[in-house]
Amino acid sequence: DTEVTQTPKHLVMGMTNKKSLKCEQHMGHRAMYWYKQKAKKPPELMFVYSYEKLSINESVPSRFSPECPNSSLLNLHLHALQPEDSALYLCASSPGQGTSYGYTFGSGTRLTVV
Amino acid sequence: GQNIDQPTEMTATEGAIVQINCTYQTSGFNGLFWYQQHAGEAPTFLSYNVLDGLEEKGRFSSFLSRSKGYSYLLLKELQMKDSASYLCATFTGGGNKLTFGTGTQLKVEL
């Protein structure tokens, strides 16, 4: 298995809703990442988990809450989002933090906040 | 901070060669990646350079000059399926972060 799987592929949520994005990989990678990508813009790093511990938080608002239950899973909990949070949310993994092997990206969750 | 620049758009002809440039100013530089991203899809890994010089991989080659803060991606024998966004990304060892440049939208025409 050489994939990063993200669910759901599409999500529409209201500003008062609570939802979660899920990411899974079975490549034995020990570092996992959340990126946010707006249309026609590059991905922007949000969070980095290394060995199931949060190692980087790029000053992301608290309405985004990451969670790494185990080495294969990464969640992003969403609460009280704003319309400007609508974007493609990409999960990625790598063998370890600080690797030359490149990151493997999932196909993303397209989030629309209404 | 990081500053990574690429041309916004490029157009090339099927079968031709195109060079996509990337300049960067960054601290704690630990390598440079090139990714390809088709619209609505995940970025896919193309190449990684950490030492100066040219890395060749099939129709794709990537070059790095660390002293100049410069890299390019060379695509040969262009195909229509190469129409995509090409993202240059620097890897900074201090924080182990992958930071993407602005991306170059390549359009391959007949």
Image: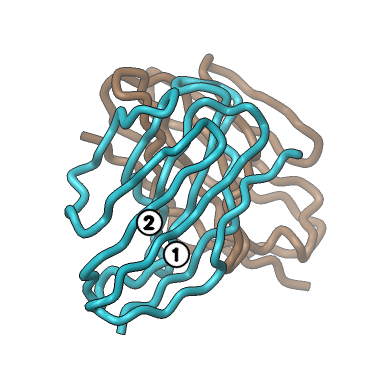
User: In this view of the protein, which residue sits in the foreground, B85 or A18?
Assistant: A18
Q: Is residue B65 visible?
A: no
Q: Quadrant of the C terminus of chain A?
A: bottom left
What is the chain letter for disc 2? A
Residue at point 40%, 50% (across, down): A35
Q: Quadrant of the N terminus of chain A?
A: top right
> Chain B appears in which tint?
brown
Q: Is residue B110 visible?
A: yes
Residue A16, quarter of the rendered image: bottom left
Image coords of residue B78 (percent x, y): 77, 55
SS category of the residue bearing label 2? strand
Residue at the spot of label 1: A88
Image coords of residue B53 (percent x, y): 58, 19
Q: Do callouts 1 and 2 mark residues in contact (Cβ within 8 Å)?
A: yes
Q: Amino acid at mark 2?
A: Lys
Residue B34, quarter of the rendered image: top right
How many marks overall?
2
Image coords of residue B102 (percent x, y): 39, 53
Residue at point 44%, 38% (across, down): A69
- Left or right: B55, with A56 as reference point: right
SS category of the residue bearing label 1? strand
* Dot 2 alpha-carbon crowd within 10 angstroms: few under 14, some 14 to 19, many 20 or more: many
The chain that appears cyan in the image is A
Residue at the spot of label 2: A36
Image coords of residue A22 (percent x, y): 49, 54
* Dot 1 alpha-carbon crowd within 10 angstroms: few under 14, some 14 to 19, many 20 or more: many
Cα separation, mark 1 vs mark 2, equals 6 Å
